[in-house]
Image (cartoon, rainbow, N blue to C red):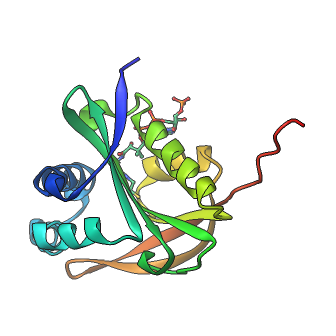
Amino acid sequence: MMAIKLIRVNKSDVTTLKNLSRQTFIETFASDNTAENMQYYLDKSFNEEKLTEEINNPNSAFYFAMLDNQPIGHLKLNFGPAQTELKENNGVEVERIYVLKDFQGQKVGQLLFDKAIQIARDRNAEYIWLGVWEKNLKAIAFYTKNGFVQFGAHAFLVGDDEQIDIMMKLVLTPVISPS
Ligand SMILES: CC(C)(COP(=O)(O)OP(=O)(O)OC[C@H]1O[C@@H](n2cnc3c(N)ncnc32)[C@H](O)[C@@H]1OP(=O)(O)O)[C@@H](O)C(=O)NCCC(=O)NCCS
């Protein structure tokens, strides 16, 4: 088992975050999208100015999964008004959860996901939700295994290609501590 540490990303990490975001997005989606649409999305979403704004947003939180000194995965959570939809105070959005291809299937995603649950519980949230591309069967299997169920769908643009995101939700049941 690898010794992975989760650390909060701060604004001095923006270049590392940009590079990791780009690499994981390319590894996940390049084979299903045109080079032009990929480039457009990468430039629009993963530039230092936009990522710095997101890191500085008090209603978002980024984490790296670190193996020794190397970031191999990342998580982005949104709370309240920073959520891309719903925007309810009793919900938390997992906007991004990505592990480098070489390190997938070794519980790094699970570690990041468990962090999301812990943070949502600490904030007394009642549910966690996310959007996932309908063709991303691997991620859908991961979320289903973690108890998420579909509650809707919405259109999502990658460049000029309109794709369908499935919206999934996990209702957090209260943890009953023994008295
Ligand atoms: C989805 C992702 C975050 C999962 O992280 P991971 O580190 O590969 O997954 P883990 O090793 O933590 O797996 C945890 C559990 O999820 C399930 N799981 C993970 N990958 C799976 C797959 N491809 N098929 C079925 N189940 C899977 C497994 O049941 C696993 O538990 P098990 O090992 O006890 O069977 C990772 O594969 C990833 O980054 N994918 C590319 C990016 C992406 O699609 N992100 C989501 C965008 S919405």
Q: Which residue reaches farthest right?
A: 179
Of residues 163 and 103, the one drawn nearer to the viewer in this rendering: 103
Question: Where, by quadrant of the figure, is residue 29 drawn?
Answer: bottom left
Residue 85 in the image: above or below residue 135: below
Q: Position of residue 179 (x, y in %)?
A: 90, 37
Ligand 1's quadrant is: top left
Residue drawn at the location 41% of the way across and 56% of the way down = 136
Residue 113 in the image: above or below residue 132: above
Q: Position of residue 152 (x, y in %)?
A: 59, 75
Q: Is residue 32 visible?
A: yes
Residue 4 horizontal side relative to residue 139, left or right: left
Residue 52 horizontal side relative to residue 105, left or right: left
Q: Is residue 100 visible?
A: no
Residue 117 horizontal side relative to residue 27, left or right: right
Residue drawn at the location 32% of the way across and 72% of the way down = 57
Pick the quarter of the image with the N terminus: top left
Of residues 74 and 143, the one drawn nearer to the viewer in this rendering: 74
Residue drawn at the location 23% of the way across and 25% of the way down = 68
Q: Position of residue 113 (x, y in %)?
A: 49, 46
Q: Which residue reaches farthest front?
A: 179
Of residues 15 and 40, the one drawn nearer to the viewer in this rendering: 15
Residue 112 horizontal side relative to residue 32, left or right: right
Residue 132 in the image: above or below residue 71: below
Residue drawn at the location 59% of the way across and 79% of the way down = 88
